Image (tube, rainbow, N blue to C red):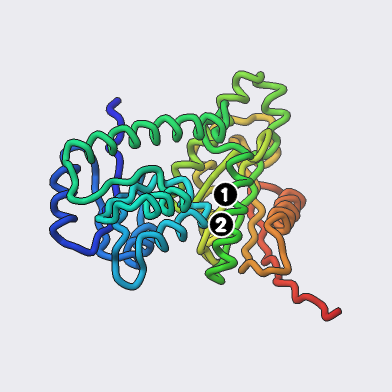
Amino acid sequence: MMDKRGTILIVDDERFNITVLKDLLDPEYDTMVAKNGRQALERIASAELPDLILLDIMMPEMDGYAVCEHLKKDPRTADIPVIFITALNQVGDESKGLQLGAIDYITKPISPDLVLLRVRNHMQFKKMSDRFRDMATLDGLTGIPNRRRFDQFLTQEWHRSLRAKSPLSLILMDIDFFKPYNDNYGHSAGDDCLRTVAQALATCLTRATDLVARYGGEEFVCVLPETDSAGAVQFGEKIRHAISRLQIPHAYSKTGPHVTISLGVTTSIPSQAAKPEELICVADQNLYRAKDEGRNRLAFSILQAVTPQPS
């Protein structure tokens, strides 16, 4: 399988510079462009994250330093490598850029060979770093994100939703009667079942902003940023039907002849008075309610905002 082409965001307020860099990089990479700092942040927020950013410093309104500082403060973008490309060439300018988190500094007028060489080196290093990160955050059995990655992602999205005052939804899922499945079909078949269910859950995702992970044992979890209660319930039912359609035989289930799942769903608009763990707690309570009500179903409630009491 061929490696996916990397994506580079070029940020410069001069059309000529953008054209030169695009012509240089397009044969090897997918490129995105932004004509100023605000537009760069908007592009990053609304599209798949780039693997590398080539960032001009001298731009009106919001300069490259401010853009870089903003990127490094956001957990979602903090690890994107930034290379400053600028006419500034004083030691203090370079030092400031590196202190803000940039990985390299190229002065204008650019040398095409030098730019291409540095981009290749940093893209290769980024690819290796991503592989090591994936090894640490993927579940070894199912191949989907693990509990560690879920914890990181939930905290990240909780704070992002807190800033944006946007809804955040969580779905906890449990395979119904998995213990008798494991006991009667064997652990190898149980592992196959977990892998099949995990891949079906991953296939249900249609947005790069969403995450499904193995929570532990036969439990899975899904985080849905910017998703209200109606959207979360609708997506939960989509998942439930997707697992039913797998038609994995389960003669020892009390819900039917095939493997099914129960789901606990909750939605919140995060507040300073609450914590992301509370979202998990409410989803877990709803999951147990779904089990108590007969399994192979979804239970939902909203995590209500808590108003701090005056001291």
Where residue 68 is drawn, which disc sits there?
none
Secondary element at image label 2: helix
Estimate the x, y position of residue 27 in percent, counting from the top left.
Answer: 16, 39
Q: Kindly give the residue lying farthest to the right in the view shown.
A: 311
Estimate the x, y position of residue 92 in percent, counting from the top left.
Answer: 40, 53
Mark 1 belongs to which amino acid?
Phe
- 76 with respect to 177 (left or right): left
Category of crowding for the residue at label 1, using alpha-carbon neighbours closer than 10 angstroms: few (below 14), some (14–19), many (at least 20): some
Mark 2 belongs to which amino acid?
Glu
Give the vertical position of 295 relative to 224 (above or below): above
Q: Are marks 2 and 1 in contact (CB under 8 Å)?
A: yes
- 31 with respect to 240 (left or right): left
**Closest to the observer: 66 or 146?**
66
Residue that appears at 24% across and 48% down: 31
Residue that appears at 45% across and 56% down: 71
Q: Quadrant of the C terminus?
A: bottom right
Figure disc tally: 2
- 223 with respect to 45 (left or right): right
Residue that appears at 23% across and 64% down: 13
Q: Kindly give the residue lying farthest to the bottom in the view shown.
A: 310
Residue denoted by label 1: 153
Estimate the x, y position of residue 158 in percent, counting from the top left.
Answer: 60, 59
Say which quarter of the image contains residue 47: bottom left
Secondary element at image label 1: helix
Estimate the x, y position of residue 70 in percent, counting from the top left.
Answer: 46, 60
Give the vertical position of 123 relative to 2 (above or below): below
Give the vertical position of 227 relative to 75 (above or below): below
Residue 25 in view here:
yes
**Closest to the observer: 122 or 87?**
87
Residue that appears at 60% across and 47% down: 152
Residue denoted by label 2: 157
